[in-house]
Structure formats: structure tokens, C-alpha cells
Amino acid sequence: MKNESESAIIESWGKNVEPWIRAIRNNEIESRILVTNKAVVDVVLDLAPRKVLDIGCGEGWLVRVLSGNGFDVLGIDAVPELIAAATGYGAGRYRTLAYSDLSVSAIGEQFDVLVCNFSLFGHESVVSLFQSAAPLLNSGGAFVVQTLHPANAGNEDETGDGWRKGSWEGFSSDFRDAVPWYFRTIDSWKSLFAASGFALTEMVEPVNPETGLPVSIVFVGRVV
Ligand SMILES: C[S@@+](CC[C@H](N)C(=O)[O-])C[C@H]1O[C@@H](n2cnc3c(N)ncnc32)[C@H](O)[C@@H]1O
């Protein structure tokens, strides 16, 4: 698989722009409010960057928060309607760009931190993004990825990397056309960082205080 799975991911976000903006701006996703927003912001603040690239920025909440902390933040996303909704809604710079088109020459600048917050769902698109990542960083820069915790995502019957059926379970009924996404084990994420020229320097597993279960995992890689 499957280039059509990769384009289906972007198309699905394009179909769900309005419910996504409502979900974020009305604080409808409990795990984000309870746990994961703070987790990713804390990790980036600790890195004390001057310039940040938010990759798959959606409607731009993280760009706004990090800009509010005095950083120069560029958000990119493949869905023009999300970039339009983000632009001018608060501080930050934005561009419509797919991961497959991401490069220093396309962007024309480098960053101290690259951050992906729940924005990596594909296979080839994610591998290509990782391959483009190191050249986008200034010396000493870091690549931060927060994603669903592999122990609590996907289907218990299926182990190992692979495409999984998508679902909007837990989201409002306005969401439609869930599409397959590519599951990776923790070891596979680690290998992807290593194969892309990064040493993993930190791995945080934020826990939902109500369930005691890890909600997500945050990886921090440094260019070797
Ligand atoms: C779950 S949303 C997360 C948005 C934002 N990072 C946040 O935390 O709210 C995933 C985002 O990744 C973007 N995305 C997924 N695949 C992409 C690709 N191949 N190129 C660019 N953007 C992509 C989608 O358009 C969507 O806005």
C-alpha cells in the first residue's frame, strides 16, 4: 500500500475541516485538554527554540500557543482550508504544503525545532517527511513527534506495523469518511528516527490521570 491511502488521508482532512475546527476551538477532545496539549507544549518550551516548524498544523492552535511564547513559528498543512482558517486567527505564519513537498528549498529557511502533533498517519509520506527533516534543522535542532500511544491505538488482534481501519469514534457525529492509517510500534518509530539521522534523546508517555493509561507518546530526536 498504497498511494491512494496516502492521498485519502489528506482528502479525509479536507472533508472534515469544519468539524475539526469546532472540535479544537470548542475544546471537544478531552484527552487533548487533560493531557496531550500540555505535553507537547512543555517539551517544545524545554527546548527553548527561536524558530519552530509545526508540520501538519491543522487549524493552528499549537502555532498560536508557541508564538505566544515569543517563538517565530511557521505552520504547514496540506489542506488549504485549514491554512486559511489558521491564517489571521492569531499569531504565526502559515503555508499550504504537503509532506512530500517539504524541503529546505521549498521552505527557504531552517528551524530549531520541528514538531508533529498527531499529524503522522501515512506510510510513505511519513518516511519521506523523516528523510527531509534533518536538513530543515539548524545545528543542535530537535525533531518532536507526539502520536497515539501504540499500546492504546489500533486493534489488539493485529500486532506489528501496518495499515489499520480508521474511525472517528470519540469525535462528534459531524466527522465523516474515516480512512485507513499506518500503525507503527514503538520500536518502529525508534528505527525511523535512527534511519533518518536522529538520536532519540527523550521519550515521554503522558498518562490520562482518570484512566491511568498512556494516551500518547512524545519522541524527541536530535540530529546525529
Ligand atoms: C489530527 S490533525 C492535527 C492538527 C494539529 N497538528 C493539531 O494538533 O491540532 C492532522 C493534520 O495533519 C495534516 N496532514 C496529514 N497528512 C498530511 C500530509 N501528507 N501533508 C501535509 N499535511 C498532512 C492534516 O491535514 C491535518 O491537518
Image: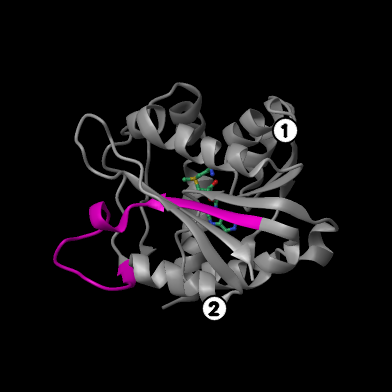
- Which stretch is magenta? 142-163
Mark 2 is on which residue type?
Answer: Ala
- Residue 168 — which label? none
Placement of the N terminus among the 4 image quadrants: bottom left
Is residue 104 found left or right of 126 in the rendered image?
right
Placement of the C terminus among the 4 image quadrants: bottom right
Is residue 165 found left or right of 130 in the rendered image?
left
Mark 1 is on which residue type?
Answer: Thr
- Residue 182 in picture, x, y percent from top left: 38, 66
Q: Is residue 82 magenta?
A: no
Which structural element holds mark 1? loop
Say whether marks 1 and 2 touch (CB < 8 Å). no
Pointer 1 or 2: first along the chain:
1
Q: Is residue 173 visible?
A: yes
Q: Is residue 189 placed above or below 202 in the rendered structure?
A: below
Residue sitting at x 63%, y 56%: 142
Residue sitting at x 33%, y 67%: 185
Please identify the quarter of the rendering in which residue 172 is found: top left
Which structural element holds mark 2? helix
Along the line of sight, the residue nearer the viewer: 175 or 218: 218
- Residue 136 in picture, x, y percent from top left: 74, 62
Q: Is residue 184 visible?
A: no
**Mark in front: 1 vs 2:** 2
Q: Is residue 155 magenta?
A: yes
Q: Is residue 205 placed above or below 105 in the rendered structure?
A: above
Residue sitting at x 46%, y 38%: 39
Along the line of sight, the residue nearer the viewer: 177 or 127: 127
Is residue 119 found left or right of 102 in the rendered image?
left
- Residue 87 — which label? 1
Residue sitting at x 19%, y 35%: 211
